[in-house]
Amino acid sequence: MDKALFELEQGRQEIRDLFSPESGSVELAVTMSSTLSKILRNFRAKQPHVRFTVQMVKPEEMVQLLHRGEVDFCLSSPLLQGEEIVSKRMGLDSILVAVPKRHRLADRISVCLSELKDEWFVGLKQGYPTRDLTDRICQSVDFTSVYVYEGDEPARLRSLVEAEIGITFVPETSTWNSSKEENIKILKVDHLKSVREIGLTWHKSRYFSQAALEFRETVIEYFLRLHRDSN
């Protein structure tokens, strides 16, 4: 059934591309939004008329979407695997800690993970890759994070940290880290290789519009530049 749906969707995409080659569309699925806004901004500067559809889903759902032909690309952490799936690692992303400005650790540049064992956390629900990764990181130093809020919307976490409801883990590539917001302090984690892999994935038989091909190049260029700037 997935193969039939895939072929039907490919035909529809080719017809859409024939009628509007100058604009086109890009269908995305993501597990995190931390890098997406910057990538979309870069692409919009070059292709302002391309239409985007973005959905945030869990990794196990992404492979199904790819096989049914419902998305062009998946931007995910961790990398996806599956039959007829092409997955390329774009980069590594460190995990940081965000605390409110009046927090006891807010005057620090970095913290040891063990210093957070008595904290209250806010974050995504279990099953989201970043949450599962940070749970494993905390368990590696023998403590389980106590969550007072668990949700599906990453954007909501900022306001909860500002309101001193709890602290949270954030990716280094997130907009939090570049923000001038004075109500939140971003701290590094000492003595821990707390990183996540970021990958771009697509179906090897997928028909790609010109817009989709250019978007893929924009993603690759973004992470190459990020890597150069960090070295």
Image (spheres, grey):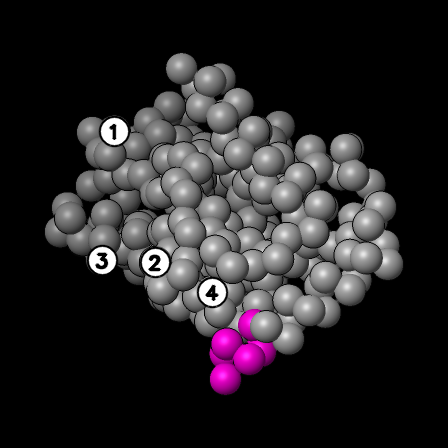
The answer for how far apart the CA atoms under marks 2 and 3 are is 29 Å
Q: Answer whether residue 4 is magenta in the image.
A: yes
> Which one is in front in this view, the residue at disc 4 or the one at disc 1?
4
Looking at the rendered structure, which numbered label has been put on residue 125?
none
Name the residue carrying label 2: 81
Q: Are marks 2 and 3 in contact (CB under 8 Å)?
A: no
> Which one is in front in this view, the residue at disc 2 or the one at disc 1?
2
**Viewer can see residue 127:** yes
Name the residue carrying label 4: 62
Q: Are marks 2 and 4 in contact (CB under 8 Å)?
A: no
Name the residue carrying label 3: 144
Q: In the depicted view, which residue is nearer to us: 115 or 176? A: 176
Q: Secondary structure at mark 4?
A: helix
Left or right: residue 56 compared with residue 109 = right
Residue at x 59%, y 52% (from the top left corner): 155
**Residue type indicated by callout 1:** Asp
Residue at x 56%, y 30% (from the top left corner): 222
**Residue type indicated by callout 2:** Gln
Residue at x 59%, y 42% (from the top left corner): 216
In the depicted structure, whether residue 5 falls above or below residue 189: below
In the depicted structure, whether residue 83 falls above or below residue 101: below
Q: Secondary structure at mark 2?
A: loop
Name the residue carrying label 1: 190
> Which one is in front in this view, the residue at disc 4 or the one at disc 3?
4
